[in-house]
Image (cartoon, rainbow, N blue to C red):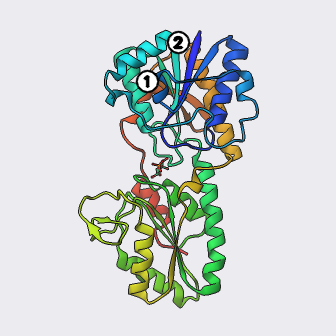
Amino acid sequence: MRVGVLTGGGDCPGLNAVIRAVVRKGVQEYGYEFTGFRDGWRGPLEGDTVRLDIPAVRGILPRGGTILGSSRTNPLQAENGIRRVKENLAGLGVDSLVVIGGEDTLGVATRLSDEYGVPCVGVPKTIDNDLSATDYTFGFDTAVGIATEAIDRLHTTAESHMRVLVVEVMGRHAGWIALHSGLAGGANVILIPEQRFDIERVCDWVTSRFKASYAPIVVVAEGATPRDGEMILKDGTLDSFGHVRLSGVGEWLAKEIEKRTGKEARTTVLGHVQRGGTPSAFDRWLATRFGLHAIEAVRDGDFGTMVALRGTDIVRVPMREATARLKTVDPELYAEVGVFFG
Ligand code: F6P
């Protein structure tokens, strides 16, 4: 049996831990051989491979990124994409695939597996934690840890200058990182894409915090949008698409807060710092367990499934469940945490 492995979409701390677990268990327990595919679906599409055996996965557990490389190539959108993938897999003697990815990458795996007979097992990955059918994705804990540390640090500089500090974190469609890091870091305002915010309410809260001699921290997910405007572009102008497609909400907020409250405000955009570097212990634990269960699913011939965390158990779910819709922050949870507090 020869198993192909690929990592697609944005990279994420813990990818290497999954690859290592899949290969070690596959080789040592089942006697499988492996083919690594370079740069997500581009690998099978172009037949671009990398050696993947026990020596290749030695020492990679604490390393961020992915030794296989990643891309957002979609073979369903390439000319003769499905035929090329199938021919390359057959030519390389690859019987099945372990696909590690987010919504787009697993969406391709779902269709290839369910509709075109390419046997795939999925492993959910995203720092955004917005994949359905699993309680958590690996990478999320690391990203939340990095954002929380940044918020902790920003408190002291905000207090020293008595200014507002706006922290923009990742999350185009879901506010999980903003919610968790904002709560852990004691932010005063948390703004998420799931609920439009009222800039006047934000400013009122900021003003009330200053009255209590407190320098407020505002955590905003990159996809958050104001109630009255539609879309914030980089230059601070508003558009009417209903989606934030360019970064800039953090900068826009700081400018608006300054203008409306007369208080000095600064913005920190954390960006890809949240995705880089070594995974947390929790993410190594989760990613390793996902990898061990994924290769077990391959052995069982349980294709079209994805491994998922439910409580403390790893289970298998139909992959299409994970990609059918995004897992967003429930309004009740948002209300429970308190949008404005502190
Ligand atoms: O992995 C998801 C994500 O981190 C989003 O939160 C973010 O908007 C996006 O990736 C940015 O990815 P890239 O810069 O690779 O296009």
Disc 1 residue lies near ligand 1 with CB under 8 A:
no
Give the residue displayed 65% in from the left and 12% down from the top.
Answer: 32
Tell me where residue 184 appears, x and y as whole percent.
61, 63
Give the residue displayed 42% in from the left and 45% down from the top.
Answer: 327
Quadrant of the rendering where the C terminus is positioned: bottom right
Residue 63 appears left or right of 201: right
Alpha-carbon neighbours of circle 2 within 10 Å: few (<14), some, or many (≥20)?
some
Residue 251 to residue 26: above or below: below
Inter-mark Cα distance, 2 to 1? 12 Å
Element carrying mark 1: helix
Residue position marked by numbered label 1 in the rendering: 45
119, 304: nearer the viewer: 119
Kind of residue sitting beneath label 1: Leu
Tell me where residue 168 appears, x and y as whole percent.
49, 65
Closer to the chain start, of discs 2 and 1, is 1
Residue 315 to residue 186: above or below: above
Tell me where residue 219 appears, x and y as whole percent.
51, 67
Give the residue displayed 36% in from the left and 40% down from the top.
Answer: 325
Q: Quadrant of residue 52?
A: top right
Residue 140 appears left or right of 330: right
Alpha-carbon neighbours of circle 1 within 10 Å: few (<14), some, or many (≥20)?
many
Quadrant of the rendering where the N terminus is positioned: top right
Residue position marked by numbered label 2 in the rendering: 92
76, 223: nearer the viewer: 76
Give the residue displayed 59% in from the left and 69% down from the top.
Answer: 186
Kind of residue sitting beneath label 2: Leu
- Number of marks drawn: 2
Q: Quadrant of residue 256?
A: bottom left
Q: Quadrant of residue 199?
A: bottom left
Q: Can you tell which mark lies on residue 277?
A: none
Residue 119 to residue 259: above or below: above
